[in-house]
Image (spheres, grey):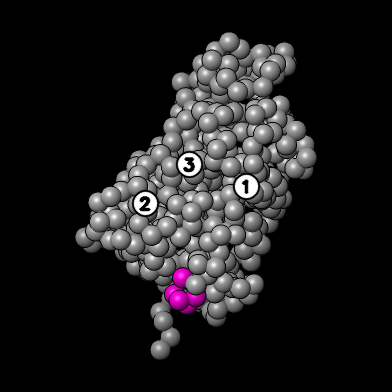
Amino acid sequence: MTRPPADVVIIGAGVVGTAIARTLAAYSLDLVLVDAAGDVGAGTSKANTAILHTGFDAKPGSLESRLLSRGSGLLRSYASAARIPVERTGALLVAWTPDQVAALPLIGENARRNGYRAVRPLAAAELYAREPALGPGALGGLEVPDESIICPWTTPLAFATEAVGAGVRLLLSARVTGVAAVGDVHELATTRGPVRCRWVVNAAGLGSDEVDRMFGGDGFTIRPRRGELIVFDKLARTLLRSILLPVPTARTKGVLVAPTVYGSDTATTAAGLRSLLAAGRRILPGLAEEEVTSTYAGLRAATEHADYQIRVDASRRYACAGGIRSTGLSASLGIAEHVAGLLDEAGLELKPRPGFAVSPPVMPYIGEAGVRPYQDAATIAADPAYGQIVCHCERVTRGEIRDALAGPVPPADPGGLRRRTRAGNGRCQGFYCGAAVSRLLSAAGVGTGPGAP
């Protein structure tokens, strides 16, 4: 029999789409979350600098500033409940030239206009006391004590896990190719067949402008911004304690060096890897002596506009959350709350789901600041699989891989398993554990070859 149309289909299972899904799941709605990829968080959400921003440097008065301020607070609380790895490292904005020093007071004032008042100036001597490995020539800086690092992989997975647990249907490998109106119902054509619904929320990231045009919009065009990252071995983590930020220009936010919750260091810029390495060496010279684990690039869903493109068209029963750039991770729950409010104002009936209690799932902890299964004698005694290490670089156990494969949102390929457990993510990049991991994936019926979804 043909399934009745869903109340809402959310297009895009990145960090914003999954946040919207878990927020709407609190109401009596039939929800479907669709994505072109074979996993949640597999697009822009997985390839970023993994910073939980305070919003100190957003444009005052913008929608991004408001939702970032609201969302970062919500995400800090959510992460604590869901065991998403977060470390409050703080950030240091480092000035290397007199012009950059002169720009610092304006940046501090900008932060205060955004409601963030904890910034404070630092003299060069204090910068070097805080970060002894900092390169020579720094003239001063600003401290932003609440900037943090977060796991960008566990976050959308936690949102999706909560949504699926509340009854949201997850449809992956389903690219939306068109839409037709049949009475008061949208019929979405996807690569996995038609999906019918009354309302659509567009959170399609890099494809959000294409989806928007399907619904008659022409207000923005995605102009992807490329960010290149070099990941250094976790032994480099001792070189710094804080996120090191440059003084931004009108054209770029420049090069940053930051730790990750997995113990490694990352650096990013829009230029090529050669200039990236040169800039990284200037900021933190000791990086030149450290091993590089991997390099990758991420695309940000920037548009010709300076702000998020979020709106609801009540006549078309359509909501758009587009133009969400690198701040989308930090702002995700604020964006979801805002979209839900706009939908309510536009006529989508948001009646609380009877008996529903907001309860974030407790996620497997894959950071370095907490206790991992291989370190917990009681956990190993209760289940010896947690003492059987499969990936020695990242200390990932057979029990963790088993749990991920049997989870409510299981991985579809080795990349998905890596984002859930860190297996294959270390210095050998799966050279040692690849065969064992492939056997476990195959035994679970998960594709591992080039044609895997």
Residue type highlighted by circle 2: Tyr
Query: Pointer 1: residues within 10 angstroms few (<14), some, or many (20+)?
Result: some
Q: Nearer the viewer, mark 1 or mark 2?
A: 2
Structural distance between the alpha carbons of marks 1 and 2:
22 Å
Q: Which residues are magenta?
A: 440-446
**Residue 286's image quarter?**
top right
Point 59% across, 55% down: residue? 429
Q: Is residue 117 above or below residue 426?
A: above
Task: Indicate the position of residue 405 as horizontal and vertical percent values.
Answer: 42, 67
Structural distance between the alpha carbons of marks 3 and 2:
17 Å
Circles 3 and 1, Cβ within 8 Å, touching? The answer is: no
Query: Pointer 3: residues within 10 angstroms few (<14), some, or many (20+)?
Result: many
Specify the quadrant that holds the C terminus.
bottom right
Q: Which mark is residue 261?
A: 3
Task: Indicate the position of residue 124 as horizontal and vertical percent values.
Answer: 61, 12
Q: Which mark is residue 249?
A: none
Structural distance between the alpha carbons of marks 3 and 1:
15 Å
* Residue 180 seen from this side: no
Q: Judging from the image, what secondary structure is the residue with disc 2 in?
A: helix
Outermost residue, left side: 355
Earlier residue among tags 3 and 1? 3
Q: Judging from the image, what secondary structure is the residue with disc 1 in?
A: strand
**Residue 290's image quarter?**
top right
- The question of residue 33 being in magenta is answered with no
Residue linked to disc 2: 374
Residue type highlighted by circle 3: Val
Specify the quadrant that holds the N terminus.
bottom left
Residue linked to disc 1: 293
* Residue 305 seen from this side: yes
Q: Nearer the viewer, mark 3 or mark 1?
A: 1
Query: Pointer 2: residues within 10 angstroms few (<14), some, or many (20+)?
Result: some
